[in-house]
Amino acid sequence: MAVRNVKIEGPYDFDRVLDRLALDPLNAVDQGNRSVKVPYYHCNEEGEVIEIQATGTTDEPEFRITFENEENLEAKQKRISDIFQWETGLHEMHEHFLGTDLKPIFEEHVGTPLVLEFDPFATIIKSIIHQQLNLKFAFTLTHRFVTTYGWKKDGVWFYPSPEKVAGLTVEELRELQFSQRKAEYAIGIGQKVSSGELNLDKLAQQPDEEVIKELTKIRGIGPWTAQSFLLFGLGRPNLFPKADIGIQNAIKKLFEMEQKPTMDELDEFSASWHPYLSYASLYLWRSIE
């Protein structure tokens, strides 16, 4: 076992992070202990469980990271820092939004960071599963998928590998209540990643437009899924998925509109939110959760 303590710049509200992570029943969150266990994916299937516990406050954030062993500590700590966006100071972003019409929700949810999914491949699979489903059933279907084909270590669930997903059949996924097309899409993305046709590490080095262009070539991946990957797989800061129903509902509620905003109205609303559109999206989602 190895333990490291990390201090970062505030504001950073880890309790709000845990609130959001706790929405997904696959996540090993202990809100009383202010901690979460994160699956760290190795090339081998076993993986490693890393525990992150908050020991500081929103204004003075500090964390205790517990690793299983001392191997590759720098790489593992960097991955944890990337997932929780510890190197991305929120102060400038927060000050920016205090001068916009989103000021009320940024004051209410101060210090809420953009947190990544724990694995890039899992991000795409989860987005495909969640397509056109209400949130409750989306989590239920994802839970069935992971607990059937993934693996569990120290109470933490790992998503199945691309190779595992590539070898599944449509019939197997249909038994979990996948639609025909959703099953085909999930297996297809597993095949492309496992074969090397889609290299997620190389994709992560590309600008937003190139990532969207490459991903939307793939059957089953539209702009919404590509933007979700950029947001929650890579942590890109300036994305606004305006076709998302949750964002539309949040804006309708915040600005007391009778109807959902049109695409043109969404463009007008968001003009002053650059270059932090991803945080506008996140805080709008939070405002109706």
Image (spheres, rainbow, N blue to C red):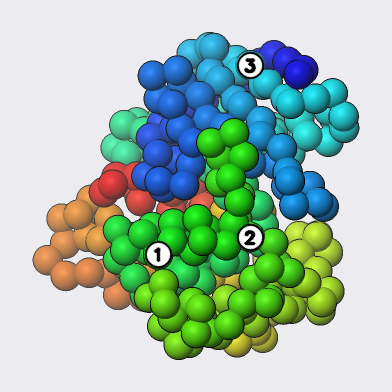
Mark 2–mark 3 Cα distance, whole angstroms, equals 28 Å
What secondary structure is marked by label 3? strand
Earlier in the chain: of badge 2 and badge 1, it is: 1
Residue at horizontal 72 percent and vertical 25 percent from the top: 67
Where residue 210 appears, as percent x and y from the top left, is 73, 73
Determine the residue positioned at 62% across, 39% down: 153
Residue position for label 2:
160
| Location of mark 1 (residue) | 141
Query: Which residue is depicted at the point 44% across and 57% down?
Result: 143
Q: Position of residue 68 (x, y in %)?
A: 74, 26
Instruction: Return the residue nearer the eye: 98 or 225.
Output: 225
In whole angstroms, how far apart are the C-alphas of marks 2 and 1?
A: 14 Å
Q: Residue flagged by tag 1: what amino acid is it?
A: Leu
Q: Which residue is denoted by mark 3 in the rendering?
A: 64
Residue contact at pointers 3 and 1, CB within 8 angstroms: no
The span from disc 3 to disc 1 (Cα, nearest Å) is: 33 Å
Q: Earlier in the sequence, mark 2 or mark 3?
A: 3
Between 188 and 84, the one nearer to me in the picture: 188
Q: Is residue 89 visible?
A: no
Callout 2–callout 1 Cβ contact below 8 Å: no
